Amino acid sequence: RKIPQWYCTHGHITTIAMISNSILHQTRRSVLSATSIATQAIHQNNSKLSGHAVTRSRCYVSRAHPPETKLIFNIGDALKLMKEQVEERKEKRAAKWENNTDKRAAKGKVDDGPFRNQDETVELALNLNLDPRKPGQALRGSLSLPHGTGKKVNVAVFISDEQDDDATIASIKSAGASHVGGASLIEDITNGTIPVTAFDRALATPDMMPFLSKVARLLGPRGLMPNAKVGTILPPDEIVDGVKAQADGIVQYRTDKNGIVHAGVGKGSFSEEQLAENVQDLMNAIQDAKPENYGKGKKNKAGGPGKGKSAPKKNEKYYLKAHLTSSQGKGSYDIDLRTLDPTSSYFMTVPPV
């Protein structure tokens, strides 16, 4: 009795000679993984786009030879592919809406206007070599993107009761704020009259910070608590300009517990050039905020340097991984770090393969 074995050559599946029972007995572990190897080879993508590295499939997988890595794209190719998929999904949604016109009419539903297609959000995820539990490695900040985020931002502004007059409130609301007030606004948030989901950003004057302790447990978990690091604590004469900046598209970024930064860099309706410029400004801001000491490190069980604490290493990398995705996309694109690192000579360009 003989069992077939599969192997992958240049991305294609090819059948080779049958394996005898004696060889099968010796290579039992390799043959057991034949199905997974064949499946992996079937899904191998042989795209010919420039600027990304392809690691070919091997005909075997073992402990010493792990499975191949994913395709790695430069940022330009990733944005191009992302735009193509976003446009394809928009066309499919519009076609589905047109095909279901009769079904909606049969149910008595009347269209109140043309189809409002979804504008997907493009997000960049950066895995940084940071441990937020260590002092000085909790990265947090904000910046104004050159083309904005494309998202409508609802802003709540906390001002003192001395400034809580009709003229001040009118000027702040005309700048783009949705809720303005002092003690009354805090009371409305506390009793649930104004839910915390009603606004996306919160600004406050310095004299209002002690009073915000009443709603800190509501604002804090959602990242809405005003903070000087992200520019949401402003003096009274800068509140109007701060509200305009938030409404125009200021993106806030911070590291999670694993040292990963998630930041929206625009919408699917943006052009490739607009998205690329937003990504460029974001990466420059992340690079400028780079702490002096960084590195997750590994704990030394035997003691050694630091008595069990993370020992510093030479030539630590600041950027570990980067992925580009969209809100309705399937999966993400693994980005070549050379095209995202501002210190690299291939920053925002096409590196050699």
Image (cartoon, grey):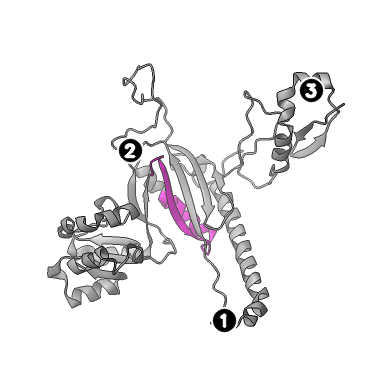
Q: Is residue 322 left or right of residue 50?
A: left
The residue wearing badge 3 is 24
For image coordinates 36% across by 36% down, the residue present is 131
Q: Position of residue 42 (x, y in %)?
A: 73, 42
* 264 falls in the magenta region: yes
- Callout 2 amino acid: Gln
- Alpha carbon of mark 1 to alpha carbon of mark 2: how far? 52 Å
Residues packed near mark 3 inside 10 Å, few (<14), some (14 to 19) or many (20 plus): some
SS class, disc 3: helix
Callout 1–callout 3 Cβ contact below 8 Å: no
Instruction: Assign the C terminus to one quadrant of the image.
Output: top right
Q: Give the mark, 1 or 3, whose residue is nearer the N terminus.
A: 3
Q: Visible in this render: residue 346?
A: no
The residue wearing badge 1 is 111
Q: Position of residue 232 (x, y in %)?
A: 27, 57
Q: Which residues are magenta?
A: 256-282
Instruction: Assign the N terminus to one quadrant of the image.
Output: top right
- Callout 1 amino acid: Asp
* 292 falls in the magenta region: no
For image coordinates 38% across by 24% down, the residue present is 299
- Callout 3 amino acid: Leu
- Alpha carbon of mark 3 to alpha carbon of mark 2: how far? 53 Å
Q: Give the mark, 3 or 2, whose residue is nearer the N terminus.
A: 3
Please determine whether, in this image, residue 156 is positioned above or below residue 304: below
SS class, disc 1: loop
Which quadrant of the view contains residue 314?
Answer: top left
The residue wearing badge 2 is 137
The front one of 78 and 205 is: 205
